[in-house]
Amino acid sequence: MLRFLFWNLNGKDLQQRVAKLVRAHQIDVLVLAECSIPEKLILDTLNV
C-alpha cells in the first residue's frame, strides 16, 4: 500500500520535521504546498 503525505508548509522552514515524518511513517509520495525551501535542500535532507 502506498503512503502519502501532503503538507502545506505556509512558507515555513520545516524540512527537518518533514524528513522525520517521512522516515517514521515510511512515506512513498510527499507533496508539499507553499514550500519556500530550495529543492536541493529538501532532497538532501530526505536522503540522509
Image (cartoon, rainbow, N blue to C red):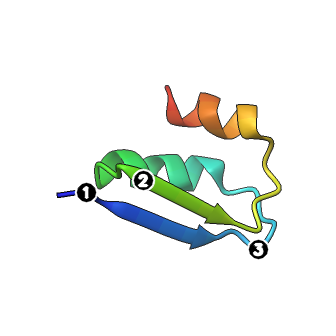
Q: Residues within 10 Å of mark 2 (few under 14, many from 20)?
A: few
Depicted 35 relative to depicted 20: above or below? below
Q: Please provide percent x and percent y for residue 14.
A: 66, 57
Task: Specify the amino acid type for callout 2.
Answer: Val
Q: Please provide percent x and percent y for residue 20.
A: 44, 49
Q: Residue furthest left?
A: 1
Q: Please provide percent x and percent y for residue 46.
A: 52, 36
Depicted 21 relative to depicted 23: above or below? below
Label disc, if present, on residue 22 of the rendered structure: none
| Quadrant assignment, res 2 | bottom left
Label disc, if present, on residue 29 of the rendered structure: 2
Left or right of residue 16: residue 35: right
Residue at left offset 76%, top offset 73%: 10
Residue at left offset 77%, top offset 68%: 34
Task: Specify the amino acid type for callout 1.
Answer: Leu
Choose the circle earlier in sequence order: 3 or 1.
1
Left or right of residue 6: residue 38: right
Q: Residues within 10 Å of mark 3 (few under 14, many from 20)?
A: few
| Quadrant in the picture for the N terminus | bottom left
Task: Specify the amino acid type for callout 3.
Answer: Asn
Circle 3 residue? 10
* Contact flag, marks 1 and 2 (Cβ < 8 Å): yes
* Contact flag, marks 2 and 3 (Cβ < 8 Å): no
Choose the circle earlier in sequence order: 2 or 3.
3
Left or right of residue 24: residue 13: right
Left or right of residue 30: residue 11: right
Circle 1 residue? 2
